[in-house]
Amino acid sequence: MQLTKIHKDFYFIEDVFTDETLNFLAIQCIAQKNGKILEQGDTIRNECGINSRAQTMVMESLREPQQLIEEYFNKSAYGNSTQLWHDESGYINGLHKDHSPNLQANVQVYLNDGNKNMGTYIIVEEILEYSVPYKKNCGYLMFNPTSNLHGTKYPVEGKRLSLYQSYRLTEQPSPIW
């Protein structure tokens, strides 16, 4: 895995998963049928959790980002529920700030190739804009998603498959999501 600092709150991550883990997660993401459907305008995101085998694979793969999160905050970090996101053509997740006290850092890893513009953007301090390209087995680590605007600027072309892992700094999660 390679972590490249773009800003103190935003890192580009590459080569996150082994080929075996990446393929397993992509198949799980495509096969999801019992996910939560999130509508945004005329488009949808299918969001679902992962099984225990996949959870173990993910947490092993994300040790390095978790260590960086713990160094950044100088506290232990705890993973929230891992999610697979399957975004359909036309989906756009406009710039927003997250609201849950459970979200101190996020990792999103793209599971398939697609138009590089389908990557995530972040606006820091309301003026500085950064982005990562949409590229298979790459993504980002973002600190302070409740303070920084982030999202996508361009609609999905085809399918956008990704794994999303958020982290909190409390052992027990807040009931506020």
Image (tube, helix red, strand yellow):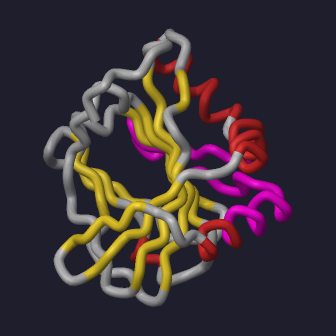
Give the position of the C terminus as an image quadrant: top left
Q: Position of residue 150 (x, y in %)?
A: 28, 53
Q: Report the residue at 44% width, 25% height from top.
A: 168
Q: Nearer the viewer, residue 159 or 81?
A: 81
Based on the displayed image, in which of its 4 quarters is residue 137 positioned? bottom right
Please tell me whether residue 126 belongs to the stretch shown in magenta.
no
Residue 30 vs 150, above or below: the answer is below
Q: Nearer the viewer, residue 147 or 86?
A: 86
Please tell me whether residue 20 belongs to the stretch shown in magenta.
yes
Q: Report the residue at 69% width, 43% height from top.
A: 55
Image position of 18 (left or right of 81): right
Magenta span of residues: 1-26
Image position of 25 (left or right of 48): right
Residue 166 vs 50, above or below: the answer is above
Image position of 175 (left or right of 19): left
Q: Position of residue 117 (x, y in %)?
A: 40, 77
Is residue 113 visible to the viewer in this orientation of the structure? Answer: yes
Is residue 139 visible to the viewer in this orientation of the structure? Answer: no
Q: Report the residue at 44% width, 14% height from top.
A: 170
Q: Report the residue at 47% width, 63% height from top.
A: 35
